[in-house]
Image (cartoon, rainbow, N blue to C red):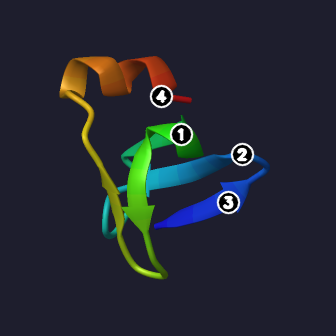
Amino acid sequence: MFAEYKDELVIIDGENKKEREYLIPKTKIDRYDDNEVYFNLSEESLKEFKI
């Protein structure tokens, strides 16, 4: 699940409950559509965007 906020995407990871939330700049996103977000970030670098 995600939402757009200014120049960033709010990504909420977890199907049934909110497990992790990220605020990722659109410049780090390869592409996205209504249902999926594609980016090439390591799990370690993803931690810097965790909210």
Give the SS element for disc 2.
loop
Give the SS element for disc 1.
helix
- The answer to whether 25 is drawn above or below residue 6 in the figure is above
Label 2 or label 1, whichever comes before in sequence order: 2
Farthest residue toward the right? 6
Q: Position of residue 38 (x, y in %)?
A: 31, 58
Specify few, some or many for label 3: CA neighbours under 10 Å numbering under 14, 14-19, or 20 or more: few
Badge 3 amino acid = Glu
Picture quarter with the C terminus:
top right
Label 4 or label 3, whichever comes before in sequence order: 3
Asked whether the beta carbons under mark 3 and mark 2 sit within 8 Å of each other, the answer is no
In the rendered structure, find residue 27 and report the number of the disc placed on it.
1
Label 2 or label 4, whichever comes before in sequence order: 2
Q: Position of residue 22 (x, y in %)?
A: 49, 39
In front of the other: label 4 or label 3?
3
Q: Which residue is mark 3?
A: 4
In front of the other: label 3 or label 2?
2
Q: CA distance from mark 4 to mark 3?
A: 16 Å
Horizontally, residue 4 falls left or right of residue 9, namely: right
Badge 4 amino acid = Lys
Q: Position of residue 7 (x, y in %)?
A: 72, 45
Horizontally, residue 15 falls left or right of residue 27, namely: left
Q: Which residue is mark 2?
A: 7
Give the SS element for disc 4.
loop
Label 1 or label 3, whichever comes before in sequence order: 3
In the rendered structure, find residue 50 and report the number of the disc placed on it.
4
Horizontally, residue 22 falls left or right of residue 39, namely: right
- The answer to whether 8 is drawn above or below residue 42 in the figure is below
Asked whether the beta carbons under mark 4 and mark 3 sit within 8 Å of each other, the answer is no
Give the SS element for disc 3.
strand
